[in-house]
Amino acid sequence: MTLARAFIGRSGAAASRVAIVVLVASVLALAAGAFAPTVTRADAPAHWRPFLLRTVADVRPPAPPPTGTDADRADLDEIVALQGRRTATRDAAIAYWTAQPAPTRWNEILLSIVRTEKINPVRTSRALGLLNAAIYDAVLASCDAKLAYRRSQPSDRDPRILRQGTPDDISAYASVDAAIAAAARTVLTSLFPGDAETFSAAADAEKTVRIATGMNTRTDIDAGEAIGTAVGALAVQRSKTDNANAIFRSTVPEFPGAWAPAKPFANQLPDEPMAGTWTPWLLTSPSQFRPGPPPAAASAAWQADADEVISVANNLTDEQFRIARFWADGAGTDTPPGHWVRLTIAMGLRDHLTTPQFARVLVHLATAEADAFIACWDTKYTYWSGRPIGLLPGFASMLITPNFPSYISGHATVSGAASSVLGTFFPSDASRLRGLAEEAAISRLYGGIHWRLDNEVGLQVGRQIGGAAIARAEADGALW
């Protein structure tokens, strides 16, 4: 566990769970060498529209100490002292935090919690939205401070300092990494208070790495931390008022073709029945893209879908079985929204996205995914459509049938949204991503837990939501 403790600290069982994932990533980072992204100028992010802040200048820190003052010299001396006392644990921490841009690391930390705690997809999408909105606004506000103060790099002010990483563009003040760390720590601690020590240890390590690598002084770090803490508090405030704590006080309706819990969930209420009332990020209301109703039970259209479900189940191919299993994304996995985050990180690392670029694509992905689940759950609990396992006598699904209504498919909706967003940010991958979304959607038919129409309409709704996310990004004047 030595390498893991280099950044995560020894903070109990919660830290240990996350540290296992980090240990593997650290070893891979040491083997592969540090990530070397191209530099994105800070003047573009400083003018992108934030998600939480009114304006990025609202959290602009005061000016740093002038170059050559006692305070500045003390900051530079701290870097020199740290660089003169190398340790194996610090080297491992440096390898971890410089191997990938910080937004990817914090998303990975969140997904490790999702897997360990078996967070459901709806709650996972909400957490990803809050985390990435806070990270994004923290990056934007840090870039605003850079344009305001344009402080030179520590190694430019002191020849004793060895630069061991990628410096912030334009100005070292305020530290983007420190802002990200503080924003992420604040949001994740609010969502998962039992893992607070883990998040604090990770944030402290990220900040220490920036000093030890000569990228930022303590003053740069403190300014970034102030920005991130303020932005994170806005995300926490939003989380307290987004209706995610609403209680279901209605009754489950009964009518021909209505949903009823499958045997494993007998006598249980459906999962997250109020998620369709949560506050969306991009949509004007949860019902903005609500589709029309599904076919009535026993109608010709319904019977055609029912016949297909039975035929597919009775003639399932090895490839269809593989697809159903691959996209299952059940409890203990990254879940469907996390699955698309993983794909995004892989493509972004391949294309050497910078920290601002990663923050930008991840926030538009995450908010689209969050709204996709809100819109999907609004539709599910408007129509209360039954599942194959509840309406087809003697039918057994290959996958475990989820405990909520059928129409529309959550997998299809989130995949339609995610593939639309990512296909625009990564145009060379657009066709492949669209194919993956269609595969994710049809996997639910192969698994026997959805009718074809659930998947087709879910994809349509998701693509509309993805379009709303892209329209928001393009309103800044350019996608990147």
Image (tube, helix red, strand yellow):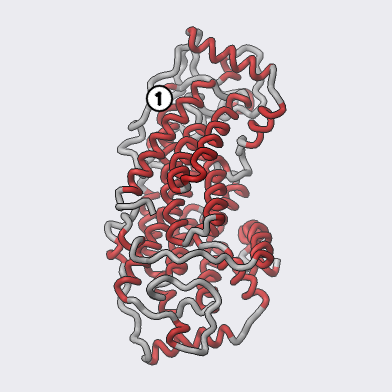
Between 123 and 206, the residue placed more toward the observer is 206
Residue drawn 53% across and 21% down?
Answer: 452
Residue 249 shows in the view: no
In this picture, is 341 found above or below 273? below
Q: Which amino acid lies under the numbered mark 1 shown in the image of this protein?
A: Thr
Residue 242 shows in the view: yes
| Residue ranking furthest to the front | 428
Dot 1: element = helix
Residue drawn 49% across and 89% down?
Answer: 159
Q: Assess disc 1: are there few (<14), some (14-19) or many (≥20) residues with their C-alpha within 10 Å of its C-alpha.
A: some
Residue drawn 52% across and 40% down?
Answer: 433
Q: Is residue 194 left or right of residue 25?
A: left
Q: Is residue 332 left or right of residue 141?
A: right
Total marks drawn?
Answer: 1
Toward which corner of the image does residue 4 lie, by quadrant?
Answer: bottom right
The quarter of the image holding the C terminus is: bottom left
Between 403 and 42, the residue placed more toward the observer is 42
The quarter of the image holding the N terminus is: bottom right
Residue 233: % across, % down: 38, 59
* Residue where numbered disc 1 is placed: 382
